[in-house]
Amino acid sequence: MTTPAPTPFGTRLRAAMDARGPLCVGIDPHASLLADWGLGDDVAGLERFTRTVVDALAERVAVLKPQSAFFERFGSRGIAVLERAVADARAAGALVLMDAKRGDIGSTMAAYASAYLDPAGPLFSDAVTVSPYLGFGSLRPALDAARAAGAGVFALALTSNPEGAEVQHAVRPDGTTVAATVLTALKAENAAEAAEGRLGSYGAVVGATLGGTAHRLGADLAIDGPLLAPGIGAQGATPDDLPAVFGAAVRNVLPSVSRGVLRHGPDAASLVAAASRMADEVRAVAE
């Protein structure tokens, strides 16, 4: 008997955004936030924080995005907390986007892909963030692994940090910017799903704080895939800024919020209320 192909990430993401609202909540247990919650900067505090967020939000938000670095800093015990969070969040119905920003070449990139995109692995996630700045082609092992697993990839394109412009705004000999090159490559990866009228599984990270930067750089955000948009909340952007940044592609935007929601913890009801308000605000401008 032939095993049916897994449902592509883009299809699952569209369904989750429609049902739960277009919102990604980051799980970023940095030291200051642990302190704000009255928790220690240790594995016990990490575990309490993470379980609280997952228990409160995994049945309600479309996507949870653990930032791997905040777990890695505690070594193997921190990774164990991350493994449980991924499994529990997915079991509760949330899609998990692993914020790892991995980027390398050849067998090393393949190993990163195996870590996050192999369904048999303990850190298997619905999608992972990657860095294309060793050349977009260096991502091929991750792109292929994602396609086989029905998972997704989000490549850094136009990030919200000011330093990103040094590379992303650079102009190639053919006159296109590096960011535009990344976006064009992602659109090509999404072509098959787009031809069937579905949201593609290969997304871009584009900061919500960028205003009209993409337009000025000739970077077309209509990649037929999701656009992960950090920068709302603590970095100064609001949902009302999204149409100006993304234009006609705004329906495919998945805003990413961390402190804007997490600062309302550790009370679970307050976390739920904050996430619901943000999802409603984003839905209002995207429709």
Image: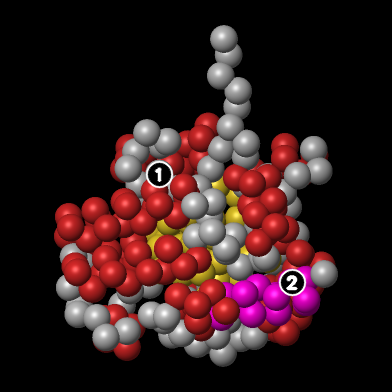
Q: Amino acid at mark 1?
A: Phe
Residue 247 pos. (x, y %): 79, 72
Residue 209 pos. (x, y %): 60, 83
**Disc 1, SS:** loop
Horizontal side, residue 178 vs residue 111: left or right: right
Q: Amino acid at mark 2?
A: Arg
Q: In which image quadrant can residue 130 be found?
A: bottom left
Q: Residue at x 64, y 85 (%)?
A: 238
In the drawing, what numbered circle is on residue 124?
1
Q: Nearer the viewer, residue 248 or 82?
A: 82
Up the image or down, 105 lies above or below 273; here it is above
Q: Nearer the viewer, residue 57 or 206?
A: 57
Is any atom of residue 110 visible in this view?
Answer: no
Residue corresponding to mark 2: 283
Is any atom of residue 15 visible in this view?
Answer: yes
In reply to whether residue 281 is colored magenta, the answer given is yes
